[in-house]
Image (spheres, grey):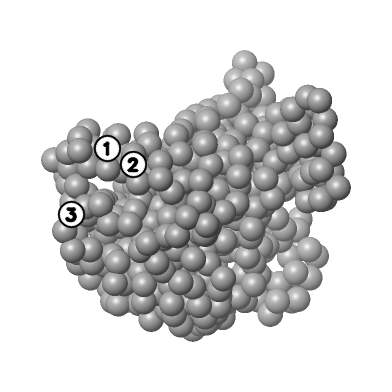
Amino acid sequence: MTDYFLELAKNPWAQKIAAKLPFSVSLPPVLNRKEVPWDDQELAGKTVLFVNIGGASSYVESNLKKSVASLSGKTITELSPDKKIAALVIDLGKAADVQDLANLYQTIHTYIKKIQTSGRLLIHWQKNAKNEAFEASLSAVVKSLGRELGKYGSTANLLLSESNAAGAATQSALIWFLSDRSAFISGQVFYIENHSSTAQQDLAMTALLAGRTAIVTGAARGIGLLIARQFRREGAHVIGIDHPSQSDSLKSEMDAIGADVFLQDLADTNAVSNIKNLIHNGPGQIDIMIHNAGITKDRTIANMQASDWERVMQVNYTFPSKMTMELLKPGSAIIPLIKEGGRIVNISSIVGIAGNFGQSNYAAAKGALIGHTKDMHKQKYGANINAIACGFIETKMTEKIPPVMREIARRMNALKQGGLPADVAETVLFLSSSLGSGISGQTFRVCGLHPAGA
């Protein structure tokens, strides 16, 4: 589906004409994205300005310099007046008082105009559990900055780490947020934990998922297909699952990338046991489970049939929650179905956070999926589990929205455009790889800083 305003924004002649019109025409910014395999050129050409205003020696600084350099980028601590930067990274350390906020303001005020288009502003803080006011203030600041930077195609995010022990995980997350793969995520707060399985990361990035087995539901098209393709691109063995009605499409697409096929209606009450048998009789264990499949049956609740409610709940919530429980608990099996340190990613929606007219069934299911993600993380089962709340993504599903409503939905976020399936797929890859080792129990809003539920 074509976004004509975005296509105009990519045309230099259209940009010149828009600039000369007697009235203001705001074209959406063109975002830098990357969909090729990870390699040691990930940050090539990028200059990162690092500023430490926490007062203490920064454990982030040395790691960041090493990591950026290993991926062909450059980190500096001083900036000449005539230079621009791809990213500004501010380390607040253990800062905790009003003066530190004033220093933060002054630093951003000094350098924000130096950030190039499609750039990054990242704030890191070593979280103090007793200082909720400081954390809430920082959260509000990055949301505001994300909205200010959005018209330039740039983003702002906050990373909170629990201690110096989380240094390797913080380092990996910073690298991903500095990359072009995080282009549609802005104005959010992410918590980096120190997991016992998190070792110092080797950032020579090739084949991020080599030797791992992943199941992706809803893999015949759209976001699920992109996830399957990118997993194969990074070396994973992929099993693509979809409804029997998608048999031809699923087989064709999975054959094209060298992935396996399994047909299953996820609304079937035997779906969980069938997929358990698939794992037992195949790889024995898996490393990654991506619950991507989803359906809608949109009606106001006054006109909604019970079957509309039940089927949407079954596919969007009941199946993934039950399947996750089976993966995490060994039950009668000798070994659990998902390996220690495995990854589970639930594809939800901002509708599950903010609701939407005529989608009470879909909102209930996607909201429950986000809550389930938090619950499973609290149980400490030995696997990282996260959710992704998609905003307006350019898919076959959103193509069905009436044109005027679709155009409004595209422009509501800070970046003034819809996201791409690749934005979701790259986030899933991050959470499924060693890069996301310190992140669990969280919901990533891939929405361009949409106001709904922010």
- Helix, strand or loop under label 2: helix
Q: Which residue is mark 2?
A: 106
Q: Which residue is mark 1?
A: 102
Residue 246 shown left or right of residue 169 in the figure? right
Name which of mark 3 and mark 2 comes first in the sequence: 3
Q: Nearer the viewer, residue 176 or 261?
A: 176
- Quarter of image, res 382: bottom left
Q: Nearer the viewer, residue 452 or 48?
A: 48
* Amino acid type, mark 1: Ala
**Distance between mark 3 and mark 2 Cα atoms:** 15 Å
Q: Are marks 1 and 2 in contact (CB under 8 Å)?
A: yes
Q: Which residue is mark 3?
A: 55
Name which of mark 3 and mark 1 comes first in the sequence: 3
- Quarter of image, res 36: bottom right
- Vertical position of residue 37 compared to residue 129: above or below: below
Q: In the rendering, at what x and y percent does residue 174 appear? A: 40, 62
